[in-house]
Amino acid sequence: MTRTPEDIADLFAFGRWATRQTLASAAPLTAEEFVQPVGGSFGSVQATLTHLYGADWVWLERWHGRSPGALPTSDGGLSLAALAAKWETVHDGQQAFVASLSPARMSEPLIYVNFAGKTLTYQICDTLVHAANHATYHRGQIATLLRQLGKTPIATDFLRYRDATPKT
């Protein structure tokens, strides 16, 4: 599969749009519903969003040559507004990194140390696709959690993104 910097930039623009939609879907939750354990990999909407934000942050750090030893933590958890603000900074960083990619750089190795202390190496393009897929997976989980809380999530399908932001 050929992956160009333009393809990756579009994928990350979609991810930013979809994350904003997901955050907007969570906005009607009460503070109690936001942290209520309802299942899934992380239990609550808050914990799942926090994990997803943290993973986006970790991959951005790795693309810049750093290997954090863990996901970022916050005592008591972050509010939806605090998560959204932190995420905008990460999304800005992702956008800048992706915009800096050349076709040759896409196949360069990314070497990092994972949380278990193991050194891993993947092509940069593969880690970018992985991060985008990881986000899509957890946005789907959040949609399920929202439904379990009696809410209706905003659709985040790629074609909805295309309809909302036509590609020129």
Image (spheres, rainbow, N blue to C red):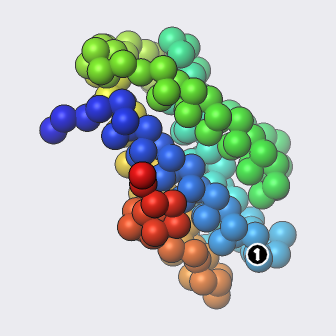
Instruction: Look at the picture and state if 139 lies above or below 149.
Output: above
Q: Where residue 72 sits in the image (x, y, percent)?
A: 68, 33
Give whichever of 19, 78 is nearer the camera.
19
Residue 40 seen by the camera? no
Q: Quadrant of residue 17?
A: bottom right
Instruction: Write the residue at 66% across / 49% down.
Output: 50
Q: Where residue 46 sits in the image (x, y, percent)?
A: 69, 59
Instruction: Write the residue at 55% across / 32% down.
Output: 94
Where is the N terminus found, in terms of image quarters?
top left
Tell me the SS state at disc 1.
loop
Residue density around tag 1, few if under 14, some if 14–19, many if 20 or more, within 10 Å = some
Q: Quadrant of residue 29?
A: bottom right
Give whichever of 70, 141 is nearer the camera.
141
14 on left or right of 91: left
Instruction: Write the residue at 61% across / 64% down.
Output: 22
3 on left or right of 28: left
All told, the count of numbered labels is 1
Q: Amino acid at mark 1?
A: Leu
46 on left or right of 12: right
Q: Where residue 21 sits in the image (x, y, percent)?
A: 61, 64
Name the residue at the bottom extreme: 150
Question: Which residue carries the number 1 mark?
Answer: 29
Name the residue at the left extreme: 1
42 on left or right of 157: right
Instruction: Look at the picture and state if 165 lies above or below 127.
Output: below
Instruction: Write the residue at 36% across / 30% down.
Output: 5
Instruction: Look at the picture and state if 8 lies above or below 152.
Output: above
Instruction: Look at the picture and state if 148 lies above or below 120.
Output: below
Q: Where residue 168 sits in the image (x, y, percent)?
A: 42, 52
Give whichever of 120, 140 is nearer the camera.
140
Residue 29 seen by the camera? yes
